[in-house]
Amino acid sequence: MRYQATAPSLLPEASAAPAELPTGTLKQQLRRAERRNRVKAFLLVLPLLLFVGITFVGPLAEMLHRSVYNPLVADSLPHTIEALDDWDRRQLPGEAAYRALAEELASLHQNRQLAKLASRLNAEQSGMRSLMTKSGRRLARLDPPIDAKAALLKIDRRWAELKYWAAINNLGSRYTLSNYLAALDMRYDAQGDIVAQPENRQIYQSLFAKTLGMSLLITLLCLLLGYPLAHLLATLPERRSNLLMILVLLPFWTSLLVRTSAWIVLLQTEGVINDLLVGLGLIDQRVQMVHNMAGTLIAMTHILLPFMVLPLYSVMKSISPSYMRAARSLGARPGYAFVRVYMPQTLPGVGAGALLTFILSIGFYITPALVGGQSGQMISNFIAYHMQTSLNWGLASALGGLLLAAVLLLYYLYNRLVGINNLKVG
């Protein structure tokens, strides 16, 4: 038998090709990986979201809800409100409404719950506090009257006027816009129509206008003072620039209350600034610069100036000096080159600084309260008054809601302007 040796093959055996995964399986794996990444990212920011929701979104939602929700009258006078459902507002309500009101006023007085209701109704119609407390006190001493209408009219003839019944009916719903109307110096009349408040009670429209005007003026003053300072910081050598930046940031390390108190010392009639002006012979009589609008403008401009400087500085620092050198080399004068070449590039910083300064100034509270006096008060001071003194939280919430709406509208307009400018540049 002849054996034939087979030489080993010099070529390696072809290995089996890996099985290709279907395209659908790859897509599913990719989607699962992306889903896992999104879940991980969400879990990382979840503590921050919870913190923001608990400390900001929740109180904000509660404030907006409180501005339209007022169940006090509906809970205190349910039978009276029910009897007034079919009232036409053109003539006095019927005996059923008088009887329900008489019974509920007597019960509220005996349970010591009438004062709060009377105060709320007095905010809608002046004179309601004395009318309600007087009627409740008298009715609590009497037996249930047979003729409730005659009994109430005998106690006080004002129960024959439609406006007092209209005040009860206007606040009879749990959800009402009366707080927002009051915040805009408007109200419901006896016929249920929206009319302007009497002139002696119109304060909030002028207060909103003054707040917006002062905020705009403070923003303009901060821009006029902050723009040259930011330009100086951006163009100085780094060592000097850092030193000046520390001076700009120094107010952030000092309490706001301390800075405001310092301005009271400086601006008062016998203060340092008046002494200096009199000593230099610039004025003969001392000037009142505190507890008025001038004191508020000066103090708030100083406090908010760093919020204008920092956005401007961050933008100016990123502008290359070669632009100005190129403009000068092409024959442009320094002033013309600065206005036409440099300033347009700083507009994002101007917009950001102005927006930040305006939003902060429109809601400022401590400085106007301490330095402003009566003429330098802003809308935030009246919000605090209704929260702490008058305890009319519904009106305070409505004023805060209008202030929030103004800020959101301003931010929306700023966003639109920035978007349009970006499109033009693109």
Image (cartoon, helix red, strand yellow):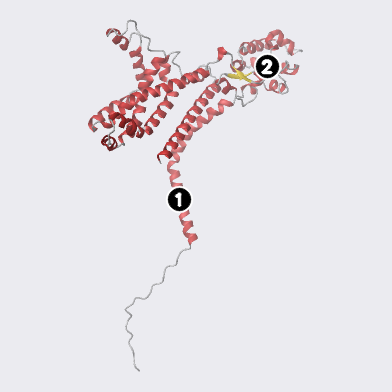
Which kind of residue does numbered mark 1 sit on? Arg
Near-viewer residue (169 or 140): 169
Left or right: where does residue 395 sit relative to residue 49?
right
**Where, quadrant-wise, is the N terminus in this rendering?**
bottom left
Q: Nearer the viewer, mark 1 or mark 2?
A: 2
Mark 2: secondary structure: helix
Near-viewer residue (70 or 299): 299
Q: Residue at x 46, y 22 (%)?
A: 212
**Where, quadrant-wise, is the C terminus in this rendering?**
top left
Q: Give the x, y percent position of residue 303.
A: 36, 22
* 126 shown above or below 410: above
Q: Give the x, y percent position of residue 18.
A: 42, 68
Local crowd at mark 1 within 10 Å, few (<14), some, or many (≥20)? few
Which kind of residue does numbered mark 2 sit on? Trp
Local crowd at mark 2 within 10 Å, few (<14), some, or many (≥20)? many
Q: Which residue is most to the right?
A: 146
* 106 shown above or below 53: above
Left or right: where does residue 27 sit relative to residue 112?
left
Res 249 visible: no
Q: What residue is shown with label 2?
A: 165
Instruction: Give the label on residue 138, or none.
Output: none
Q: Residue at x 29, y 37 (%)?
A: 323
Question: CA gap, disc 1 to disc 2?
Answer: 63 Å
* 151 shown above or below 425: above
Q: Give the x, y percent position of residue 424.
A: 42, 38
Q: Residue at x 42, y 43 (%)?
A: 44
Q: What residue is shown with label 1?
A: 36
